[in-house]
Structure formats: C-alpha cells, structure tokens
Amino acid sequence: MLKASNLKKGHIVLINGHPYQAKQIDVQTPSARGANTLYKVRFAAIPSGQKLEQAFKGNDTLDEVDLERRPINFLYKDRDFFTFMDTDNYEQYTLAEELLGEQALWLSEGLEGITALLLSGNIIAIELPASVDLEIAETAPVIKGATATNRNKPAVLSNGVTVLVPEYLAAGEVVRINIELVRFMSRVKE
C-alpha cells in the first residue's frame, strides 16, 4: 500500500483493477486549520494512455503495482517507436512514442541508466536517470568575464529543449541537465 502523500510522478498504481501511471501531481495545502492537504493526480492508463484525474487526501492509500525492474539501454528510434535492449539478457523491447510522452525528449542513442518497468514480461513504461549529458547546440556568444557573475542565458540543447545555462558556456560544450526540473546542473569535463 502506498499513501497518496508518498506518490511520486512515474509511480504505477492500480485503480479499479487497472494499472495507471502518475503523470502530474498538484499539491493543494489549504490555509484553514484542520483542513487536509489534497493531492490532485493526473494518471495515464497503461498501455492505452487514457487520461484519468483523481484527488486524494494525504492519508488515502493506493495499491502499488508489483513490477519487475530491468536495466536497459536506448538503441534507436524508428518512426514512432523506440527500441531498448535489456543489458543483462540482450532482449529487445519496443515502446510507442505516445506512451513515453515527455520522456522521449531526453532519449539519445546509447543513453544508459534507464530502467524498464515490466508487467507480466511486457514493457509498460521506463524510468529515466535523474540527469543526462547533452551538447549545447546553440546559444549566445561567450561574454568575457562572465565567470565572475552569476547570470544565465538561454541555450538550445541537441535534443531541442531550451534551458538556462551560465553565460560562460558556448555552443558545442556538454552539460549535465536535471530531467525532472529541466535545469542546468554542471558542465561535463571531457
């Protein structure tokens, strides 16, 4: 059993006997004394992707799905399908782009640290690592003396996502990005 207050984005739970993955969680804390914190959760059905929104109080319990977790690597994308390989037994899995949602943005060939979530031997979802290393595709020119200030500028990464990076970084440099917050973490030394 999983308390609603411990539910995180990506968790898979049973609702009315069907598995759903938490996609977005909004926490509403009322200012009145004695009022309960509400957790409004947007779920996606697995594997259909059908949306479901529900609200829970912090002490409400949910049935967590017992899943097998396997380490996988991303191999390639073919049209709307992504192919992954199990790093232990070299078995390959394919997932449709609509099931991956925003996660598809962060997949690049050879990306390691991905976990496959299997239900009855079938892949139903993936968990990405907390951070990925990507190259800066384009950004404003480097400003001399920018290391002394703590200002940021927008940069477009190799996957097309725009993030704020320190002014001293230039196009072609590799940076580490926190996927969940979509934030610059550090420069990756080569």
Image: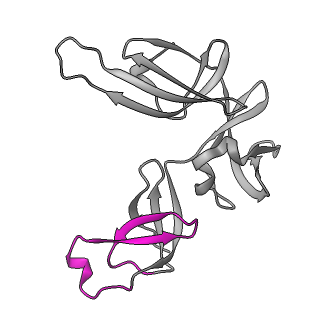
| Residue 145: in magenta span | yes
Above-or-below relation of 96 to 62: below
| Residue 115: in magenta span | no
- In the rendered view, does 54 fall on the left or right side of 103? left
- In the rendered view, does 115 fall on the left or right side of 96? left
Residue 110 horizontal/vertical position (percent): 68, 60
Above-or-below relation of 26 to 183: above
Residue 78 horizontal/vertical position (percent): 80, 58
Residue found at the very far bottom of the displayed protein = 144
Residue that appears at 44% across and 32% down: 25
- Is 77 or 25 nearer to us in this picture? 25
Q: Provide the residue span drawn in magenta.
A: 141-170
Residue that appears at 45% across and 59% down: 177
- Is 1 or 21 nearer to us in this picture? 21
- In the rendered view, does 140 fall on the left or right side of 63? left
Residue 173 horizontal/vertical position (percent): 48, 77
How many numbered marks have been drawn onto this rendered protein structure? 0
* Quarter-of-image position of residue 20: top right
Residue 99 horizontal/vertical position (percent): 68, 41
Above-or-below relation of 116 to 161: above
Taking the image as drawn, is residue 113 in sight?
no
* Quarter-of-image position of residue 31: top left
- State the scheme by which the image is colored: one colour
